[in-house]
Amino acid sequence: MKTLLIGLFLISSAWASFPLVKVDNISGTYSEKKGKAFAEHASYDLDVVKIDHKNIEVEFNNIEGNLVLNDPNTTVEINFDFSFLNVFRTIAFNGVNIVSTQKKFISNMNELRVFIEPTEYVLEEVELSSDISGIGGDLKEISILEGLITNGDLGVKTVNFGKIDSEKFRAQVIAENPDVKAEAYKMFSVNESTKSIPVTGRNLRLVSKDQSFSGSLLLDSWINAWFYFGGKVENDPDAKKLYIDLYKAKIGIFSVRGLALRTIRNLNLESVSVEGNRIIVDFGEVLHAKPNDSKQSTIAKR
């Protein structure tokens, strides 16, 4: 049995190119600043170490700030700050596959469950990718997060939002669109059977290119209309913050930007705030790579 102490930040650290990583069929949970996951296979090729695991167990502890990977022969401990996971409070995921080459990052997931009190959001068939191979200029340092912002693509087959109060929803749409009140009453009709009804989104597509993003989502069930949104996203690694400016959010002919921003604010997430039309995600230390950590020597102990 070996213990390898490796200082790095995989997602948020800057690399000359993406780190070489391959993970097959990982499933797990994260709650109360701790988590555990299992994978059939995981391999990574970094500046300080090359490791290949089979039947791997992964433990991540945000309190101690480390990531521990165990297989029958090897234990690997990686310094890591998981503060960003606390945005979600409790999450569960299964069927996750990740492939990262020098210029491409691809991840797909069978299911992701996110619990934000009092609602559980369920995402099925999630695909996330980034391709920086066609980007010109000097790319001496780029993180996976920055790669996704520069040229990223997110697709989700279904998103279960749980039940909503349809009467309250319609009132908020009318308040934001007083000139089309009659159309809102017609489109968002409310009766006893639709007062509290589950809403599912289908075929979510979100594309980010050069810090601008646009997306669409078909809201079925009671709403039965397309939700379109777009804006600008900026990563500030020095401030350890992500800024999302929401320029547009519409359901059919109705603007719902104010409604969307209020909904995000009312989630009361510790790491997320809303100022005007801007959403601010505070990653804390997760985007701050300690210089000595990223190149720390590998130490083996039998």
Image (cartoon, rainbow, N blue to C red):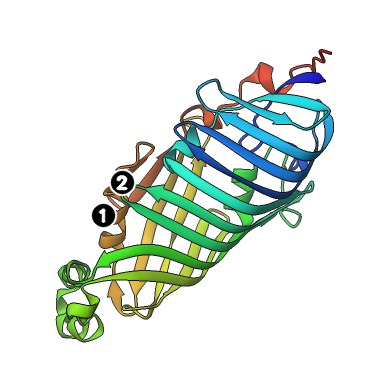
Q: Tell me which amino acid carries mark 1.
A: Arg
Give the CA distance from mark 2 to mark 1.
8 Å
Drawn side of residue 252 relative to residue 175, left or right: right
Residue, disc 1: 262
Among the 4 quarters of the image, the one containing residue 156:
bottom right
Residue 219: percent from left, percent from top: 40, 74
Vertical placement of residue 128 versus 281, above or below: below
Among the 4 quarters of the image, the one containing residue 256:
bottom left
Q: Residue at x 41, y 66 (%)?
A: 229
Mark 2 vs mark 1, foreground winner is: 1
User: Where residue 170 is drawn, which disc sits there?
Assistant: none
| Residue 14 in view, yes or no | no
Q: Residues within 10 Å of mark 1 (few under 14, many from 20)?
A: some
How many numbered circles are shown?
A: 2
Q: Residue at x 31, y 46 (%)?
A: 274
Drawn side of residue 299 relative to residue 149, left or right: right
User: Does the CB distance between marks 2 and 1 fall below 8 Å?
Assistant: yes
Q: Quadrant of the C terminus?
A: top right
Residue 127: percent from left, percent from top: 62, 61
Q: Residue at x 21, y 82 (%)?
A: 189
Q: Tell me which amino acid carries mark 2.
A: Val
Give 168 or 121, whichever is nearer the viewer. 121
Drawn side of residue 274 relative to residue 296, left or right: left
The local secondary structure at tag 1 comes to helix
Q: Residues within 10 Å of mark 2 (few under 14, many from 20)?
A: some
The local secondary structure at tag 2 comes to strand
Give 19 or 67, whichever is nearer the viewer. 67
User: Where residue 274 is drawn, which disc sits there?
Assistant: 2
Residue 2: percent from left, percent from top: 81, 19
Q: Residue at x 51, y 58 (%)?
A: 212
| Residue 46 in view, yes or no | yes
Drawn side of residue 249 relative to residue 61, left or right: left
